[in-house]
């Protein structure tokens, strides 16, 4: 099972596609480090990051959310150098205070290099742990992906954390209809439109950047209004403490 991916079994069709992508990246020498069960790092990730930073929405953004994976290190680093405040989730959202705030001004005051703070270990150690409720309205949101389509469909490593995260941020009003949702991948991670089936709670992307091009997906799909509670897995309730708290608040609001 481990060879098929850590979360294999939830969606066999997506499992097969992820395994094909992971295997291709590793066999082709494109993956940097292990790919399987990860958001894979890839050759050309820095160039893909640069393409996103040319967007007017990026240039204007002050509060940027990124995923914690090595593939998006260049984006985190560029954000800090451009004076943007980073908001990064604790990997898999498994702890209380599941977000980390990284303020470049505070880093400079403490003589902490941006290169260190942009790394997973660095931002976890030098950032400020905060709750979901403490995240401000976000101007730009970056998600990690294993496979994407040119139309904006995406799939991650199989745990469902990115879609849950997007749902929570929507539920709390931290992202809106105009907030760009984006990813960076290697060009070989782009698959035909019919290979990723999106459900009503899945999050469509506005832009996909690769080492070769920036794709404006033109997606007009509505964003999830919040969390599709009926699709939350039992292990997700166990591993993400905030989910149970938010669910109880939702139930209390329904009762009143």
Image (spheres, helix red, strand yellow):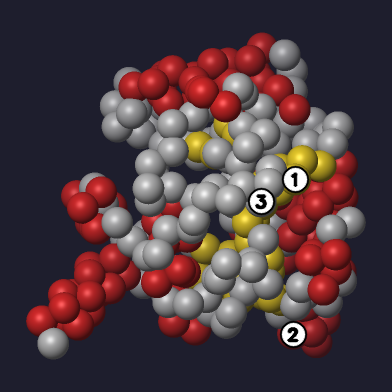
Q: In this view, does 106 lie to the left or right of 174?
A: right
Q: Which of marks 2 and 1 is nearer the N terminus?
A: 2
Residue 170 position within the rendered picture, expressed as x and y whole percent measured from the top left: 45, 69
Comparing 143 with 129, the one in front is 143
Residue 144 position within the rendered picture, expressed as x and y whole percent measured from the top left: 59, 46
Q: Earlier in the sequence, mark 3 or mark 2?
A: 2
The residue positioned 34% from the left and 22% from the top of the image is: 12
Give the mark toward the camera: 2 or 1: 1
Name the residue carrying label 3. 206
Point out which mark residue 42 bears.
none
- What is the quadrant of the N terminus in the image? top left
Point out which mark residue 106 bears.
2
Residue 111 position within the rendered picture, expressed as x and y whole percent measured from the top left: 82, 79
Q: Do the residues labelled 1 and 3 touch (CB within 8 Å)?
A: yes
Name the residue carrying label 1. 216
Relative to residue 229, is residue 188 depicted above or below?
above
Q: Which of marks 1 and 3 is nearer the N terminus?
A: 3
Q: Is residue 245 left or right of residue 208?
A: left
Q: Distance between the residues labelled 1 and 3?
A: 6 Å
Q: Residues within 10 Å of mark 2 (few under 14, many from 20)?
A: few
Could you say whether the residue bearing mark 3 is in a helix, strand or loop?
A: loop
């Amino acid at each position: 099972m481990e060879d098929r991916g850590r979360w294999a079994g939830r969606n066999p069709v997506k499992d097969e596609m992820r395994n094909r992508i992971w295997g291709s990246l590793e066999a082709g020498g494109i993956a940097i480090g292990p790919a399987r069960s990860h958001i894979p790092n890839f050759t050309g990730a820095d160039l893909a990051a640069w393409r996103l930073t040319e967007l007017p929405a990026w240039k204007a953004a002050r509060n940027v959310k990124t995923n914690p994976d090595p593939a998006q290190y260049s984006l985190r680093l560029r954000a800090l150098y451009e004076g943007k405040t980073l908001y990064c989730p604790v990997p898999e959202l498994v702890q209380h205070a599941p977000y980390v705030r990284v303020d470049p001004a505070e880093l400079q005051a403490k003589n902490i290099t941006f290169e260190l703070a942009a790394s997973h270990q660095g931002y976890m150690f030098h950032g400020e742990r905060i709750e979901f409720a403490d995240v401000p309205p976000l101007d730009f949101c970056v998600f990690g992906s294993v496979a994407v389509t040119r139309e904006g469909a995406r799939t991650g490593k199989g745990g469902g954390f990115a879609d849950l995260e997007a749902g929570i941020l929507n539920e709390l009003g931290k992202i809106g209809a105009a907030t760009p949702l984006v990813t960076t991948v290697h060009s070989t991670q782009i698959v035909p439109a019919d290979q990723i089936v999106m459900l009503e709670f899945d999050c469509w992307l506005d832009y996909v950047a690769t080492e070769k091009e920036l794709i404006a997906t033109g997606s007009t799909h509505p964003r999830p209004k919040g969390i599709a509670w009926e699709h939350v897995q039992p292990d997700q309730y166990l591993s993400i403490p905030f989910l149970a708290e938010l669910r109880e608040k939702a139930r209390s609001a329904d009762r009143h």
